[in-house]
Image (tube, grey):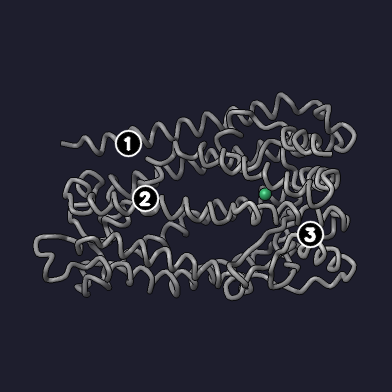
Amino acid sequence: MNEFSLLFLFMLALATTVQLWLLKRQRVHVATHRQAVPKEFEQAVSLEAHQKAADYTRAKTGVTSIELIYGTILLILWTLGGGLQLLDNIWRSFELSPLLTGTGFMLTVFLAMSLLELPFSLYRTFNLEQRFGFNRNTPKLFIIDSLKQVLLMLLIGGPFAALVLWLMSPSEADSGRLARENWWLYVWSVWMGFSLLMMWAYPAIIAPLFNKFNPLEDSALEQRIRQLLERCGFAYQGVFVMDGSRRSSHGNAYFTGLGNNKRIVFFDTLLKSLKPEEIEAVLAHELGHFRRKHVLKHMLVMAAMSFISLLILGALIEKDWFYTELGMSQPSLHAGLLLFLLIMPVFTFFIQPLMARTMRKHEFEADDFAAEQADANHLISALVKLYEENASTLTPDPLFSAFHDSHPPAPVRIAHLSAKT
Ligand SMILES: [Zn+2]
């Protein structure tokens, strides 16, 4: 009996084919519209910039396609190909306690996965981004970053994996079961608490390990921002400038943190290219996400999805076929967790367009908020500058965009904002 193996392979093939087809559509669509700047952007964007965006988009989708095929092959090798089984055998041969075996196994898999992804992140940074003039990273900084990431994974991921496995371990009342009864409910609660803690701690503890954050010094701009925040009744911990230019010339702005630990972060690259009134409009958009409760909604959706996922895993983890049909001979807590984490995206892949649609709806709502609190024209000019400087395509394939894009296609978004002026 190997119905589940076949179902898994079928879903994997389907998801990979659909994604490759969408990427191909995107490449073709961008290439067909390469010759002319779309009418509504003719004034603001040069043909040269438009063609750079087209070439950059095509190069990026090309790498993504190869990475997708590579990831699909790796997933088969990990599961049915026996990769996980091999690592499990090695860890079991050390004859440590189940908790240490499980934690060691999980950390080794995560470490191996990041190593296997390394060629792609190297290629993206030092070839793709370099070719289009976006890369500011150096090999030295890249290595330091990678080492820090591994260290963080061991320091945070290690204890957390051990905690989860400990919560799952059966007690004496669970004889005949692999895992404690209702373990998934405990793990879900701990996972939620951990996520909130990380959201709170990230801006203060983790982000500064990778970047410098200095308080915004431009006092005229600071005053403008403070007035906007007061107008919107927004409590925050400060406006910071991040040295994003250390690694890339792409510009961005974001909100981070939780409760009274909220921060506003501007990349130095963004501040350089936008006028104060444009920065105010971008900030008003970001504030819109908070005021329309998008962050909270996102957190609630994630909480509900992880609840359902863990509920399903609660049933699967006791079934022998779940392991054998995915290439592992011996059921265990750590094998169950890891198999589930690996194969889940294959089965939830088709939820993606729904999520992307909700996110695009939120972008429109945040734009509406920005148009009320600031000037829609300034947001338009800021967005056009950002599209141009980041070489974002103005002509995405409609189907690709509907499936993947968290932001509305440029022409649609600008038209929506223009109607508010
Ligand atoms: Zn937004």
N-terminal label among 2 and 3:
3
Graded by Cα atoms within 10 Å as few (under 14), some (14 to 19) or many (20 or more), the crowding at tag 3 reads many
From the image, state whether disc 1 or disc 3 is nearer to you. Answer: 3
The quadrant holding residue 403 is top right
Name the residue at 58% across, 33% down. 402
Asked if residue 104 can be seen in this view, the reply is no
Residue under numbered circle 2: 342
Is the CB atom of the residue marked by disc 2 within 8 angstroms of ligand 1's nearest atom? no
Q: Is residue 314 left or right of residue 404?
A: left
- The amino acid type, in three-letter code, at marker 1 is Leu
Query: Against 347, is 204 above or below?
Result: below
- Give the residue drawn at x 64%, y 68%: 262
Residue drawn at x 24%, y 47% as measured from the top left: 327
Residue 27 sits above or below residue 228 on the image = above
Q: Which mark is residue 9?
A: 1
Give the CA distance from mark 2 to mark 3.
36 Å
Among the 4 quarters of the image, the one containing residue 392: top right
Quadrant containing the C terminus in the rendered view:
top right
Q: Amino acid at mark 3?
A: Thr
Taking depth in this image into account, of 16 and 143 the one nearest to the observer is 16
Distance in Å between CA atoms under marks 1 and 2? 13 Å
Q: Residues within 10 Å of mark 1 (few under 14, many from 20)?
A: some
Q: Secondary structure at mark 1?
A: helix
Q: In the rendering, which numbered label is found on residue 265?
A: none
Q: Which quadrant, please, contains the N terminus?
A: top left
All told, the count of numbered labels is 3
Decide which of 417, 107 is in the foreground and name it: 417
Report which residue position mark 3 lands on: 269
Whichever of labels 1 and 3 marks the residue nearer the N terminus, that label is: 1
Q: Position of residue 104 (x, y in %)?
A: 32, 69
